[in-house]
Structures are given as C-alpha cells and as structure tokens.
Image: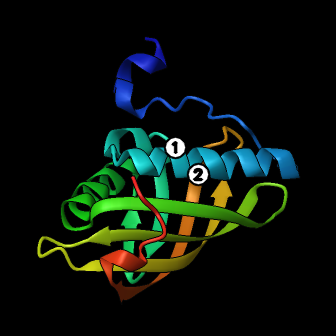
Amino acid sequence: MNSLTTIEPRQIETARPPLPPFTKETALAKVQAAEDAWNTRDPDKVALAYTVDTQWRNRSTMLAGREEIKQFLIEKWQTELGYRLKKELWSFTDNRIAVTFFYEWHDKSLNWFRSYGNELWEFATTGLMQRRIASINDKAINESDRQLRN
C-alpha cells in the first residue's frame, strides 16, 4: 500500500520557497510573502504556510497544528475587522527569522486599534513555519490616525 493513500490531501506539505538557510534577500522575501498572505485575511491560504504540526504562542494563547491555526484566524478576523498588516524584517539566521510588525483594525462599534508586536519564526527544511512565537500589544487609535489603508 502506498503510504500517501493514508494521508488526507490537506495534510500533505508542499515546500514553500524560499527555503532555509536564509540570506538577507530570501529572508526579506519570506517576510513579504507572510505580509501579503495575512493581508488577504484568508485563513486557508495563510495556514498553508505552516507545517501540519506547527506550534504557536500568540499572546497568551497556545495553538498546535494547522487546523487550530485556521480556526484561530477565522475567529480573529471575525473580531478584528478591516485588518491591515505591515511586517518588517528584524533579523535572521539559518532557519529562523525575527520580525516586528503592526496592524490596524476596528471592532464592530468602529473603534480603531493599532496592534504592535514581534514574532520569532522557525522554519522546517520545506520552508514551512514550524514554530511561531508572537508578543502583541494593542493601542486604541482614532480613525484619522490610521497609517495603513486598504
């Protein structure tokens, strides 16, 4: 029996270039790809950048696996409306990248927020992220103070 017949199609991991070890150019490309994907607000698309068994710490929430990530993102973007994100490469090494970021969003009452944070990423040899550690703080802002527009 072919071992692939026992794996559901959504569990097959496709390489996601650029692959580690990273150079400055490939690290910048990885950060831009992440920013672009997150700005789609498409949980299915975003989740494909992570290993099936990915491990996350997002603020105080611990998540494990691509399916948990997808559910987390669905709930996130039902609450954080008008979400727009900007990421910046902070540093990198062989299979790790550190970024700083901010994103803006509003709640259902049209109260605007800017969320600031730092992320530590660790990648598998496939270029998929296997670990993500995020520290994030929120600040209420006026709509007129927004820096990111759709």
Instruction: Tell me what residue is drawn at x 12 percent, y 76 percent.
Output: 109
For this rendering, which residue is in front, 83 or 89? 83
For this rendering, which residue is in front, 24 or 5? 24
Q: Can you give x and y, in whole percent of width and height, for residue 100 in the image? A: 63, 72
Task: Identify the disc placed on residue 129.
Answer: 2
Q: Can you give x and y, in whole percent of width and height, for residue 78 in the image? A: 18, 60
Hey, what amino acid is under mark 1?
Answer: Ala
Res 7 seen here: no
Instruction: Tell me what residue is drawn at x 56 percent, y 29 percent.
Output: 14
Q: Residue furthest right?
A: 23
Q: Can you give x and y, in whole percent of width and height, for residue 2 in the image? A: 46, 12
Instruction: Tell me what residue is drawn at x 41 percent, y 33 percent.
Output: 11
Q: In the rendered image, which residue does mark 1 sit on? A: 49
- The correct choice, above or below, for 25 with respect to 101 in the image is above
Q: Marks 1 and 2, Cα distance to the nearest angstrom?
A: 6 Å
Q: Is residue 134 left or right of residue 21?
A: left
Q: Are marks 1 and 2 in contact (CB under 8 Å)?
A: yes
Res 3 seen here: yes
Instruction: State which quarter of the image contains the N terminus.
Output: top left
Hey, what amino acid is under mark 2?
Answer: Met
